[in-house]
Amino acid sequence: MADYGLIGEKLGHSFSAAIHNQFGYDYELRELPPSELESFMSNPPFLGFNVTIPYKQAVMPYLDEIHPYAAEIGAVNTVVVKNGKRCGYNTDFAGMKFALDEYGIRIDGKDVLILGSGGTAHTATALVKSLNAKRVRTVSRTGALNYENLPTEGKDAQIIINTTPVGMYPHSDGCPVDLSWFPQLQGVFDAVYNPLTTRLVSHAKARGIAAGNGLLMLVAQAKFARDLFLGTPCDDGVIHDILRKLEFDKQNIVLVGMSGCGKTTIGKLLAERLTKTFVDTDEQLIKIFGKSIPQVFQENGEQAFRAAERDVVEDISKRNGLVIATGGGAPLSEVSRERLKQNAVTVYLTRNVQSLDRTGRPLAVSEQRVSEMLAVRDPVYRDMSDFVVSNDSTPQDTAERIIEELQI
């Protein structure tokens, strides 16, 4: 049995074990229904454990000691068992501060909105007050400031901190607010960390607003919890070391480009080299329809194909650690582009038009037609991609150049 762990009601999305195991000790995820919390807290099986939704407040009555910060915040996310006593702390406070600093989100003198009213919201409220926010308001479904009156009552907001689960895997399409409501917005922090880029963060960055998600906070608070568990501090530099490894492990690599440019071949090479799982959206569609793609276009029509393609993209993009080869037309859907980028580094794979393989491509009836499609698609591919790599040499050379660009 592990000496350390995490308790929560549902932990299927948790990255905590992947983080804590890098500190050199075993760490276990322990899902607890509410009916078992009292029994667990009466005799914890761990030397130390973290606490997540929905127990950050619920564990407090069972503790023998509560650190002043945690008591003031009204939420505990770390418990250490010392000499038979259960001592509660809040490392979310330091973890969130670390993340805000790294993302360049300045609180001093700002009008701040906190979305949500749970334990993480309490932490965020205490933190921004300590950082001299000009005004701090909480947004909830039934509060005085709620999602119905927010567009008018909250329009002066300069900073938004989301502590709700809206936009979290598996409901990654969610976004708690429309950022167009806030013309003075300067910073957005989303405590959600799965997907790696939530729609809220994506929309903020598209507007040129300083923004970041909760993964950095998660790693930072884990480091501070580790210091409490072991009783000795380690250098904060380990936070970035673990973050880089975790992002690489969890990130997808998405290949976009014209049909026949070699995405499947290159994708399989990358998956083998990087120990990731390869997925081809066209192969998934062939399985769904039970026929070749030219047959689908002929018998079902392009509209039916594109609808199924969007569903496949939605399902695949929620997963982690994949190399994904997309169909040439998949990125033409704005919804699909946004979904693909949530957990991914995106690579635009180019190839000379004369070298594109048109076999089995129902829309690539001639070289001229391919050139016309490329003229439309090229700006879309470039806009959504993190970098562009030419596939006009050998597949092995192309895969190596992608790996170099990824800076692995």
Image: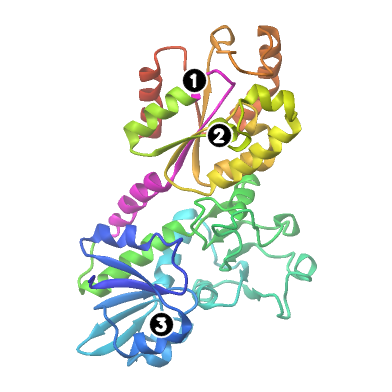
Inspect this view and state whether residue 333 appears.
yes
Residue designated by label 2:
281
Instruction: Give the mark nearer the N terminus: 2 vs 1.
Output: 1
In the image, what residue occupies the spot 73% across and 74% down? 146
Local secondary structure at mark 1? loop
Residue designated by label 1:
262
Question: Badge 2 local density, few (<14 within 10 Å), some, or many (20+)?
Answer: some
In the image, what residue occupies the spot 41% across and 27% down? 402
Residue bounds of the magenta highlight: 235-263
Amino acid under label 2? Thr
Inspect this view and state whether residue 59 appears.
no
- Rendering coords of residue 224 (x, y %): 32, 68
How far is mark 2 from mark 1, CA to CA?
14 Å
The quadrant the C terminus occupies is top left
Local secondary structure at mark 3? helix
For the residues labelled 2 and 3, say whether their Cβ atoms are less than 8 Å apart: no
